Image (cartoon, grey):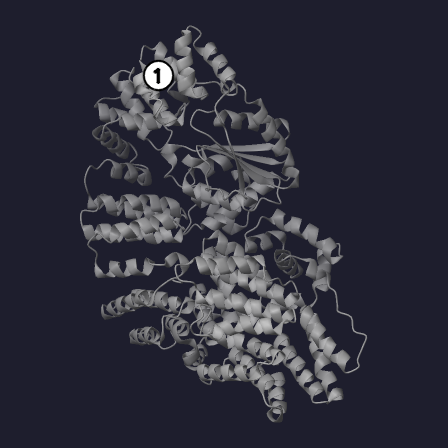
Amino acid sequence: MAVTAGEQFFGREDVLGRLLGALGEVEAGGFGIGVAGEPGVGKSALLRRLAEGAESARFTVLSAQGSQSETHLPYASLHQLLGPLLSQAHGLPTQQEQSLLACFGMVEAVDVNPFFTALAVLELLVEASSERPLLVALDDLHWMDRPTTDALAFVARRIADERVVLLCTSRAQSPLLGDDQVVRWIELDGLPTGAAEALLRSRAPDLAPGVRRRVIAHAGGNPLALVEFAAALQSGTDPWTELDTDLPMTTRLERAFAARADELEPTGRTVLDVAALDDGDDLDEVLTAAGLVSGRAVDRTAALAALDLGLLTISGPTYAFRHPLMRSALRHAMSQERRERGHAALASALAAHPERAVWHRANSIPGREESVAAELERSAAEARRRGAFATALTRLERAPALSPDPRDQAARLLGVAELGYELGRFARVEEIKAQVTRLTMRPRDRARLTWLEGAFHDGAASEPADVRRLVDLARRATGQDDTDLAMQLLFGAARRVWWRDPGEAVREEIIGAARAVPLPAGDPRLLAVLGLAEAPELSGPIIDQLNGWPADGGGRADLAVLLGIAAFCAGDFVRAESYLSTAIRELRAEGRLSLLAEALAIRAWAEINLGVFDTARSADEGVRLADETGQQVWAGTARLAVALVDAIGGSWSARHPLLAQAESTALQLPNASSSLLAGAQLVRGVGELGADRPEQAYSELRRVFVPTDPAHQRVQQLWTVSYLAEAAVRSGRRVEAAAQVDAVERLANGTAAVGTAIALEYSRAVLAEDAAAEDLFRTAVTGAAHPFPWHQARAQLAHGSWLRRQRRVTESREPLRAARSAFDALGAKAWAVRADQELRATGERGWQPTTTDRAQLSAQEAQIAELAAQGMSNREIGQRLFLSHRTVGSHLYRIFPKLGITSRQQLAGALGGDVLHAAQSSD
C-alpha cells in the first residue's frame, strides 16, 4: 500500500520553501545539499517536489535513484543520470568521451580511467547548465554504486563556480560526495502530530481512537509507517508483537512488508523473492529464474498479485519495488537455502551477462569453490580494466570466502587490501591486515602484508624494526628470483628512511640488499632506493648513473618519477625538475592522480631549492590532488612548499595556516615525520629572515641539524645550511655555524650536485674570515649559483654588505644594485628592501619597489593565466588541471581585470617572463 507524495508532504511546506529558496542561490555558484532521514520519512517525496519546483523555476533537472540490487554494478546510477546527455558526449575531448562511453559498455576500450570519466561527467553537467541552471537529483545515495558516487564526488568538489546544484537523499548523512564544506545536510524528521493524525484518518478512518493513538506513537510521524501499520491492523495482523517499538524503524517496516508478502500464493512469492535477489530490472529475467526455482514455466500473471498488493510496479519490460525496504525485507525473510537457490537460478538465467552471472553464482554456493573464486578474480580484473575500481573491490571481497586453500584465501585477501589501499579505504585495509595475520600465508604474501604496513602514510611512521623486516623480506625475494617484489619492498624501506631516519646500520642494510638484487647499476628503481636511503654519501655515483639517462627519462612516467626521486635526493635539482616534469606530463595524460600529486610536490621543492618560486602554481595543485587522493604526507609536503613561497614573497606569518596544517600532519603520525618537521623549520627560518628577525631564524633553522631533535633530517641539512649561515652572520653566531657547515661538507662527500654546491659555496663565503672572503664571494656569485637569480642575488647581497663593512663603499654598490633588482623581479620584497637599505647606507637614494598586478592572482589563477598565455584553450587547460572548461573561463573572467587587460592576447605581456619559464617547463 503506497503512500502518495502528497501524504508524505503533510506539514512539510516550510522545508520545501527553505530548499527552494536555497536553489535560488545557484547564480552565485554551485553547491551540494543532502537530505537525511529514516526510511519512509518522505525524502523521495521531498526530492520530487523540489525537482518540480526547480523545473518551474526554469532549471534543467537530471535525476537518478540508487538501487540496493545495483550497488555492485559499476556506473549503473551514473548511466541513469546521464542518459539525456549522452548524445552530447561526442563534443568531449577524445580521452574523456572514450572513457565515459566505455564505462557504459558503449565502446570497446583497452582501459578506462576513472578520473577522465569523472571529468567527462563534470563537462557534460556544466555544459547542460550553460543556458539554464542545473539540478542533479540523487535519490537513495546510499544505494548507488561506488564508481558513480566517486565520479559525483569529483564533480561536487568542482562546482563552486558553476550553476549546478547536487541534491541527494540518504538514510544518514554521508561522506560519499564530500565533507560538510561540499554538501550541506539537513535532517528530515517525522510529521508533526496533527499532520500524522490527518494522514492516518485519511487512510484508516475506522480505527478506534485507542488503536489510532498507538499507531501514531509507534510510527513516530513516519508517513510510510503510519500507512503500513494501519494496513497491518486492517489485514488482521497483530502488529504490536512484531512491530516492537524497541526495534529500529527500518526493521519494523521490513516486518510489515514481509507480512504483506506472506499473502501471496507460492508461485507469486517465488517471483517476488527472485526479484529481491536480482541486480537488474528486466522482468523476463526474473520470470525465467523463478521458473527454474519452481520447476515449471512462469509468466507475467504470476507477478500481478504482487502488483495488486502494492509491492511491485511494472512498466513494459521492467519492474521495480515500490520502496527499497521491500527488497531488503524479502531478503531477510528468506532462508539461506532459498536465497542460494534463487541466486543459482539467476546465474543460469543471466548466462548472456557473465559479469552479473558470476556474482549470483558466488552467492549461490554454501561452501567453498575454487573455480568460482577464480572467476570472481577475473571479473574483478575486468571491472578494474573499465576503471570501476570500487566494483572490482566488491567482487574481490567475495573471492577469499570461496577459496578452499587457506593460502589462496590469504593471497586474495591481500589483493583486496592492496586495491583498497589504492582506493583510500584505510579502515578496510586495517581490518584485512588483522584478519590475514591469523591465516597461513606463502612467504611472498607475508612480504606483501609487510609492505602494506604504514602504506597510507608512505611509511612515515615506521620504527627501525619495521624497516629491517622489509629488508629481510626483500633478501628472500631476491633469493627466489622475484626481482620486482624485492625492489618494491626495498623502495618501501628506503621511503621510510626519508621520512624518519632509522639509523646508519639500517641504511647500510638497505644499500647492501639493493646492491644484491641482480639489476643494472643504472636501473631507476635501484637509483631511487640508493638516493632515498643514503643520498649524501652516494650522490656522486647516483649522478654518474643518471648521466646515462635522457633528460625526459625515456618518456615513461614510472621511470621518470623514479629518476626524479633519485636526482632530487642526490641534490641534482635541475635534473630532478626535468625528469619530474616529464612524469607529470605523462601522469596527467593517464589521469593517475595519486602519483601525480606526489610528483607535483617533489618538483615544487626541486624548483624552490633552485630559487624558482613561481612553482607555487604546481605546489598548490599538489595540495589539492593529494588531499583528494587521501595522501596526507604528500599534501603536507606541498603545503610547506606553498608556505615557503609565501614567506619569500612577504606574506609571512608564524601562524600561516598551510604551515600549521603540515605540522599537524607530521605530529599526528605515530612517530613524527622528521622530513615534514624539517621542512616546516626551513619555512619558519626563511620567514623570520624575511621579517628581519635573524636570531629567531637561527633558532628555527638549527633544529634541522640537531640529531636528537624531531626535526633533524640528514639530507635536508644540505639545502637548509645556507639559510642557517645567513641567519648566523646576521645574529652573531658565525663560529657555531661554521662548525655546522664543516659537518655538512663532510656529509656531502665532495658531491658536485648543483643544490649542494650552491648551498656550500654561499655558506663558505659568508662565514669566511676577511682574508679569505673575497675569493669565496667571487665563487659564490659566479659558480653554481650563477644561472639561478635567487641564489646569485643572495650571494651578491652578502658580498655587497661585506664590501661595505670593509669600507669599500663604491665597490659595494654594483652587487647590491644587482641583488636589489633581482629580488624585486622575483617578488622577494623583504630581500629587495634589505638590499636597498644597504645601498642607502652607502648614500644611494631614490629606489621604489616594483608593484605587479600578477601578485593579485591566486596560485590557481596564475597557473590558468600562464597556460592561457601559452595559447591553450579552456578545454585544454581544464583537461590538464581536472577542471571544467567553464570553470577555467570563469577564472579568466576574474583574472583579466586583476591584470588590467581585456583579452587573452594581452596575457603574455601582463605576465612577462613568467610565461617563458612556464612554457619551458610546461607539463
Q: Which residue is situated farthest in the right direction here?
A: 846
Image-quadrant location for residue 258:
top left
Numbered marks: total? 1
Q: Relative to residue 212, is residue 423 depicted above or below? A: below
Residue at the image point whose x is 51% and y is 82% from the top: 741
Q: Is residue 208 left or right of residue 264?
A: right
Residue at the image point whose x is 42% and y is 18% from the top: 217
Q: Relative to residue 216, is residue 371 depicted above or below? A: below
Q: Which x, y percent locates residue 518?
A: 29, 74
Q: Which residue is mark 1?
A: 304
Q: Which x, y percent locates residue 710?
A: 44, 68
Hey, what amino acid is under mark 1? Answer: Leu
Name the element at disc 1: helix
Quadrant of the rendering where the N terminus is positioned: top left
Image-quadrant location for residue 456:
bottom left
Q: Relative to residue 682, is residue 61 depicted above or below? A: above
Q: Would residue 15 be seen by someone viewing this image from the given angle?
A: yes
Q: Is residue 264 left or right of residue 840?
A: left
Q: Is residue 124 left or right of residue 40?
A: right
Q: Is residue 757 left or right of residue 276?
A: right
